[in-house]
Image (cartoon, coloured by chain):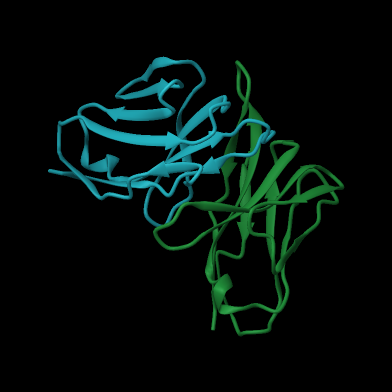
Amino acid sequence: QKEVEQNSGPLSVPEGAIASLNCTYSDRGSQSFFWYRQYSGKSPELIMFIYSNGDKEDGRFTAQLNKASQYVSLLIRDSQPSDSATYLCAVNLHNAGNMLTFGGGTRLMVKP
Amino acid sequence: NAGVTQTPKFRILKIGQSMTLQCTQDMNHNYMYWYRQDPGMGLKLIYYSVGAGITDKGEVPNGYNVSRSTTEDFPLRLELAAPSQTSVYFCASSYPLAGGGDTQYFGPGTRLTVL
């Protein structure tokens, strides 16, 4: 089992819809969770981080964390074509210091 | 404040050649990292550093070396390049987040092809 898993996609949603991206992790002791967005040919950029169970909202983005079930999600409301990118989930695994372990990413396509 | 800069942006190497990928950050971050990203894949950690003079191996260190003589610079050395090292290389530095934990700022990447 991979330490951080994501469906590679592509996930296709129509413009204006809610895009739901999911990530599962294997280490129950993991403390912090990150979502990065990566446009084609560009470097990853941080869009959300979450530490506590529940939801965290920032504009059109909501991160959801469920430590008991070991998954973290990213919801994008009112999806725009400019949201089309690959979304990388990253987890700070227990006893890993500051190291992040990345999932393989989910490619999101928002169609006008 | 330039953030994390990397040079070169692109490079083609022949098998067996060597090169150094440069990485510089001007944010005074202690932690720095080198990742590689193969097409359609996530990021794999090659080496990291927790401060000047201190480096350690990540998940995929074979074929690479690093040094950290200053806080700002973290070069990655490829010795005897092989086609398996064809990839995009990202350098990152990390800063502490309010509430705990660190997150990482990435440079623009170096696209390397070994033929």
Q: Quick check: B19 left or right of A28?
A: right
* Front residue of B7 and A97: A97
Total numbered labels placed on residues in the image:
0
Position above or below: B6 against B54: below
Front residue of this view, candidates A19 and A65:
A65
Q: Quadrant of the C terminus of chain B?
A: bottom right
In the figure, the green chain has which letter? Answer: B
Which colour is chain A painted?
cyan
The residue sitting at the front extreme is A1
The structure residue drawn at horizontal position 29% and vertical position 28%, both measured from the top left corner, is: A75
The location of residue A79, given as percent across then percent down, is 22, 33
User: Is B1 or B111 nearer to us in this picture?
Assistant: B111
Q: Position of residue A72 (x, y in %)?
A: 40, 28
Please tell me which residue is depicted at 60% across the width and 17% down the height of the picture: B98
Residue in the image at 68% along x and 51% along y: B58
Q: Image point 34% across, 35% down: which residue?
A: A22
Residue A59 horizontal side relative to residue B56, left or right? left
> Which corner quadrant of the image does residue A37 belong to?
top left
Where is residue A19? Give x, y as percent: 23, 33
Residue A53's x, y, as percent? 44, 15
Q: Is residue A57 above or below residue A82?
A: above
Looking at the figure, which quarter contains the N terminus of chain B? top right
